[in-house]
Image: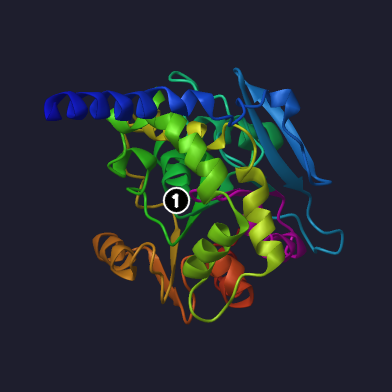
Amino acid sequence: MIKKILLFTSLFILICLFVVPWLIPVGSAQKAAEIPTPFPESQTVDIYGTVIHYRHWEPRPMASEQKAPVLLVHGFSGSTFSYRNMIPALQAQGHRVVAVDLPAFGYSDREIRAHQLPDALLCLFLMLQHEPTQPWIVMGHSMGASVVSDIAAAYPRVVSARVLIDGVPQLRPGNSGIGGIFTTAFFRRWASILGKYYFFTSNRIQSLLASAYGPEVAPTTADVNGYLEPLLLPGTAEAILKKFRYASAVQAKAAPENIPTLLIWGEFDSWIPIRVGESYHQKHPNTQWTVISGAGHNPMETHPDTCNAVILDFIANQNL
């Protein structure tokens, strides 16, 4: 009798695990044409079947001269919103700015495929579309640092300088340990359910941002909404897991040491410890190393004046 009870209990649990997830509504991934473009400067481009949302700013009219264009690449679960406090300072100095939403994030495609172009190539397409003759300054935050480093490694002629903010080239999705069985359809379905009903809520994002921002700055309602709104697009959680699955196949190589590089880290970064940045700097001593006092994982958001001053000084010293 006990064996039968255990057997039926096990069958019931298996049915719940493997059948119930497909009975819970989560919404299907939105087609590219259905994803909104929420900002006045929003633009989209279809690059070999992958639709990318990005934002483009021209230099301010009062800038004395037009300087090197700048590409901004966000980190995990971020978007162009992550750089909102940096863009005006770059414009004022005469820089054209392009900020991109990588696939699965922001307002870009939620249809992630195994053989779509890598993020670095998608970004390169945008760079060459907007400025094909002048080398770019490429900036990446957290996992975005790996994307801009891939660009610099594979196409060094299009990169004049590199800025890495609380991230190093090795921090790519495929190196996180998430892959294989954890990115199969079964787990992606559960991720979609947990994302919609548990993780992608105002309280959860508030808590995560508080951790990322560090001890000196508390996230505002506008900050929370800026991160939460694109995460609520149908198909986001599943797209993120697909990205982890396929990104694991990306093979990285080092960017040339002669590309000027600035590495910025928040003093109290609890997401990626400062020792990761220190280790990278020790291995690459030509890299300019700067610690933003009091900042956490997102110094360009929480300490924009200090962060912008460091970046603009670095750019000026390179005559860019």
At a point 41% along the width and 76% down the height, the residue shown is 268
Give the x, y percent position of residue 253: 31, 39
Q: Is 13 on the left or on the right of 46, as rendered?
A: left
Instruction: Say whether residue 156 is magenta.
Output: no
Q: Is 13 on the left or on the right of 312, as rendered?
A: left
Instruction: Say whether residue 72 is magenta.
Output: yes
Give the x, y percent position of residue 292: 48, 76
Helix, strand or loop status at disc 1: helix
- Extent of the magenta region: 71-97
Residue 311 in view? no
At a point 14% along the width and 26% down the height, the residue shown is 1
Q: Nearer the viewer, residue 259 or 311?
A: 311
Q: Nearer the viewer, residue 241 or 291?
A: 241
The quarter of the rendered structure image containing the C terminus is bottom right
Q: Nearer the viewer, residue 253 or 9?
A: 9
In this rendering, the answer to whether 27 lies above or below 165 is above
Q: Amino acid at mark 1?
A: Ala
Residue matched to label 1: 145
Q: Is 305 on the left or on the right of 252, as rendered?
A: right
- Name which quarter of the figure residue 87 lies in: bottom right
